[in-house]
Image: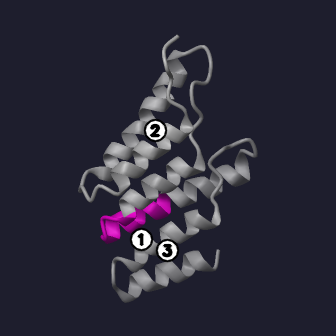
Amino acid sequence: EDYLPGPEQYTALIDAYANSGSSDAPERAEKIISRITEANEKSNRTVVTPTASMSDGIMKAYANLGTAEGAEQATAILNRMEYLREHNPLSNCKPSVYSYGVAISAWTRVGSQEAAENAEAILHR
C-alpha cells in the first residue's frame, strides 16, 4: 500500500515554508491546504483534515513577511478560525492561544501605531 502523508507531515511542510523567508511562502503554504482539499474531494474518504496547526503555519508565513498586507492576511485566517469555532463545532481549525499570538506577532512586525492598535485589538478578543 502506498504511503499517505498525515496531518503532521503536512504541518511540517507548511512550517518549512513559513520559516523559509521566501516572499512566496504564504502562497506556497496555502497551496498545500488546496491540495489536501482536492485530494479529499477526489477520494471517497477524507484523506487528511486540515488542522489549526496548519492554519497557524500559514499565519506564521504571512507574519514573517513583516508587512501590513501579511498581517491583514494572518488576521483574516484567524477570523476564519473564529468563525469555524462558532459555526462548526466539529472543525479541527479552532484557534488556540498560539493562533492569537501569531496574529499579534504579525502586527508587531509592521512597526506602526496602527499596527500596534491592531495587535492590541486581537489581544482583547
Q: Position of residue 10 (x, y in %)?
A: 47, 39
Q: Residue furthest top?
A: 1
Please name the residue that numbered disc 3 is placed on. Answer: 104
The stretch of residues the image draws in magenta is: 63-76
Vertical side of 111 occupied by 13: above or below: above
Report the amino acid beneath label 2: Ile
Do the numbered discs 1 and 3 sit on residues whose CB atoms are within 8 Å?
Answer: yes
3D distance between C-alphas at marks 1 and 2: 21 Å
Instruction: Tell me if mark 3 has few (under 14), some (14-19) or many (20+) residues whose alpha carbon lies within 10 angstroms of its own.
Output: many
Per the image, label 2 sits on a secondary structure element best described as helix
Q: Give whichever of 16, 98 is nearer the camera.
A: 16
Per the image, label 3 sits on a secondary structure element best described as helix
Please name the residue that numbered disc 2 is placed on. Answer: 33
Left/right placement of residue 108 relative to residue 92 reads left
Instruction: Tell me if mark 2 has few (under 14), some (14-19) or many (20+) residues whose alpha carbon lies within 10 angstroms of its own.
Output: many
Q: Which of the image's four quarters has the C terminus?
A: bottom right
Q: Position of residue 38 (x, y in %)?
A: 46, 25
Report the amino acid beneath label 3: Ile
For image coordinates 49% across by 74% down, the residue present is 104
Report the amino acid beneath label 1: Ala
Please name the residue that numbered disc 1 is placed on. Answer: 106
Left/right placement of residue 82 relative to residue 64 reads right
Do the numbered discs 1 and 2 sit on residues whose CB atoms are within 8 Å?
Answer: no
